[in-house]
Amino acid sequence: MRQAVDKILRTECGLLPGERLLVGVSGGPDSVALLHILHVLSGALPLCLHVAHLDHSLRCASAADAHFVSELCRGWNLPLTSRRIDVRSEARRLGVGLEEGARLVRRAFLEEVASAHGCRWIALGHHRGDQAETVLHRFIRGAAVSGLAAMAPCTPPYLRPLLGFGRRQILRYLGEHGLRWREDASNDDPAFTRNRLRKEILPLLAEINPRIEEHLFRLSRRVALEEDYWRGEEDRALAQLRRRSDSETTLDRAKLLQLHPSLRLRVIRRAVLEVRKHLEGIGAVHLESIERLLLGPKPQAELHLPGIFIRRRYERLSLSVLPSPCAQPFIFEISLPGRFLLPDGRMLQAELLPASLGEGRDCVEFDAAAVSFPLTVRSFRPGDRFHPSGSPGGKKLKDFFIDRKIDATLRSSLPLVVSEEILWVAGVRRCHGRRPLVDRPVLRLSLISTPES
């Protein structure tokens, strides 16, 4: 076992000489065996070990476990950070189940201790049986195929050097070296899903195939190998269809639809990971709901999944951890020519000119005699009607927005310049009529960007 762990640490994980390594030790057989192996190897590698123990405050015997780990570290002259946390209360505060809460609290504790002591890696005692449980657990919870890769031997900052070993091998190692350990009675509590998998489901499967644990482990390794290939494909696809901003990631819908469905789902999953920073709570059912949004008949729709908002806006699919911004209604009057600040930070300039200079996307001109001050500048209101330039007649402004494929989230922020009718949907389209006449004064309206806009 020592030789195998030494190889994993040197080749797969790339530990450097003198590396500082935090070892999570519960006092159970797996973590005790791991600590002993690392302690023996630490001189040759060499490694600087620091031990972390978390008392979850869930059992009366937990204090005795903490004392056992303390004495073990004292005997081996290893530094220890031990802490007691009321995990049940923390799980309630986080709004998760006890099993998930314990995992989150334990992870936060280990990463805090690793950071405090300059440890780049955190070594955990997961073994082959734990991997089999994880594969089954993810399968019954509806994980995507990629989730069946389960745990990896080296996933920064975590190392799992015992992942390829079975429990019998670990117990044999402990016996050969006369090592004691603590048994956690909560490991037999059927209230925890993993315990039922270990104590009930895996033994039933072993009656059909005695090597079920080994096969589930090999399945996880095969999936992990294929995932390594797919990550490269995801990188290439995302580079072609993704745009990022400070608030969201946007995907090109047309390019997404050109991808094979298998790759498309993976690209969506990868985008979710980039935005959320993790995939906890996201399963295959969530990814499929995003794809339905992408393929569905509604050109504008929104989906709220755990920790992320997905929005389809015509040919864009955007992902953000923030809800859609709600623009506040606004209205003000322009009594005289001048410059006026708009809510989005741009300036609206109104000026009277002796002759036309020509129109553009951000400037329009009207016969000054056909438009009288004051003008009103305001946001969109339900029921607004607009006669766009070049159109045979008026229509609901909402229908105009739909025809132009203007995002629903942007409609309320577009300035409308109004006299008796909507003269200009600023930066989008002017109204029909009221054109400048030759040798007649002109009212020119312009949008001017500012450094802040």
Image: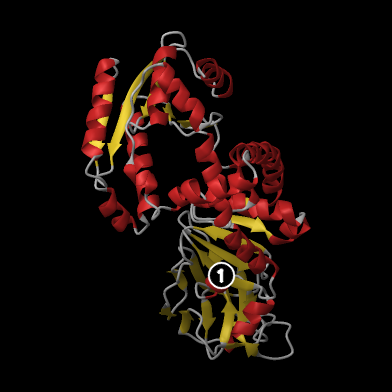
Please name the amino acid that badge 1 sits on. Glu
Residue 116: horizontal and vertical position, in percent?
31, 29
Above/below status of 106 relative to 288: above
Above/below status of 198 relative to 10: below
Residue 140: horizontal and vertical position, in percent?
56, 56
Tally the numbered discs.
Answer: 1
Q: In the visual, does 75 lie left or right of 30?
A: left
Q: In the visual, does 306 lie left or right of 265?
A: left
Above/below status of 80 relative to 269: above
Residue 126: horizontal and vertical position, in percent?
47, 34
Residue receiving disc 1: 302
Element carrying mark 1: strand
Report the front residue among 56 and 365.
56
Report the front residue among 321 and 128.
128
At x 49%, y 67%, the residue is 324
Q: Can residue 220 be seen here?
A: yes
Give residue 437's quadrant in the image: bottom right
**Farthest top residue in view:** 44
Report the front residue among 264 and 162.
162
Give residue 14's quadrant in the image: top right
Q: In the visual, does 300 lie left or right of 323?
A: right
At x 28%, y 27%, the residue is 69
Q: Can residue 360 be seen here?
A: no
Give residue 335's quadrant in the image: bottom left
Q: Residues within 10 Å of mark 1 (few under 14, many from 20)?
A: some
Residue 106: horizontal and vertical position, in percent?
35, 41
At x 63%, y 55%, the residue is 268
Report the front residue among 200 and 440.
200
At x 61%, y 56%, the residue is 250
The colour mode here is: secondary structure
